Image (cartoon, rainbow, N blue to C red):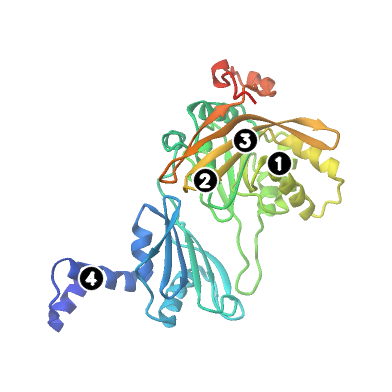
Amino acid sequence: MIKAARELLAQEGIQVTGTTRDELLDAVADEVLGLGPLEPLLRDPAVTEVMVNDLDRIFYEREGRLFRSPTRFRDRQHIMRIIERIVAPLGRRIDESSPMVDARLPDGSRVNITIPPVSPKAPTITIRKFRADKMRMADLISVGAMSEATAEFLAMCVRAKLNIIISGGTGTGKTTLLNALSGFIPNTERIITIEDPAELRLQQDHVITMEARPPSIEGKNQVHQRDLVRNSLRMRPDRIIIGEVRGSECFDMLQAMNTGHEGSISTVHANTPRDAIARLENMVLMAGMDLPAKAIREQICSAIDVFIQVQRLQDGSRKISHVTEVSGMEGDTITLQDIFLFKLERVDEDGHVQGSMQPTGVRPGFAEKFAMAGIDLPNHLFGNGMGL
């Protein structure tokens, strides 16, 4: 493609040299083979999200902060041509009768698109880039997302087959942490992952990836995550990993956790561990189960061992803020006990958050599960506490 563009420049006698010539050739290649003005942003490994608000309003996220790109689309036809290039290979349709679509790029990046009349001013494109080089636990420690003691404790929780829920808001790094935690699952276990869309990249040999499917153009043949969770129980899993629990599949996940499928891990959108419990309750009700609140909470209490809360702070950094044990029931209320907490120390002049993950001094109550897995919890992980 680049060679053909060079020959065309030579034939037309266009005098363009140096950097400008290379930029022109790249732009032509991006327009013909890629996603036009979005392609340079998608190639940049430091860019994590690309957002098109209008023809000349393109933003991107780098290191947790938003910046405006100087690039733009020529006109409405230009942006619609790029949108068609995204959705056409997937057999999806976007028009006035279906003005919203979720799609995925060939590299796994997630795309959401809206067009008028849903977004009356202009079509919008939101791309959550797929990270090919998944961060491991050592990487998360090096960027300050957690302490070494926290990482060591979480690794023990995974090896001891505790059921873990990672909670947090959009873009806080839940999937990244889930992928890092999965690295501690023994290579001898059979793992089934259920996602919508598939993003996890597990290193183990015995992994089966299952992905929910949206309805076809005719509105048929949709496969829900709940269908996949139910089917996975017939596939002899050692571990079930649900990328994100977001609906009626929550009931089946809790049932699986309570019937011998230990070591399951999932994520949920919530701002605190307590909020995560409320979200799980609501999702069980979405399954159409007419259960009293206390029965649902007892299911949650017996199924889940640990909540890990992740947050994106004001400087754009992602950190674990809570590692919380589900310690039991008091009446109708699930009791929680914080094991590690993020302690904010200060915000410096450049707006960077300074703080550290510290133990509360409380040892978890699920020592029996660690003992059954042959794991001894060292006292140094829990320190002297924060004086809480």
Few, some or many C-alpha atoms within 10 Å of disc 3 (few <14, some 14-19, many ≥20)?
some
Residue 80 image point, x, y percent: 46, 78
> Which tag, 3 or 1, sits closer to the chain's start?
3
Amino acid on which the number 1 mark rests in the picture: Arg
> Which tag, 1 or 2, sits closer to the chain's start?
1
Going 75% across and 41% down the picture, which residue do you hit?
A: 255
Residue closer to the observer: 183 or 118: 118
> Under tag 2, what secondary structure?
loop
According to the picture, the residue beneath numbered tag 3 turns out to be 238
The answer to the question of whether label 3 and label 1 lie on touching residues, with beta carbons closer than 8 A, is no
Q: In this rendering, is residue 292 above or below 324?
A: below
Q: Which mark is residue 25?
A: 4
Residue closer to the observer: 107 or 122: 122
> Which tag, 3 or 4, sits closer to the chain's start?
4
Residue 248 image point, x, y percent: 73, 53
The answer to the question of whether label 4 and label 1 lie on touching residues, with beta carbons closer than 8 A, is no
According to the picture, the residue beneath numbered tag 1 turns out to be 274
Residue at mark 1 to residue at mark 2: CA–CA distance:
19 Å
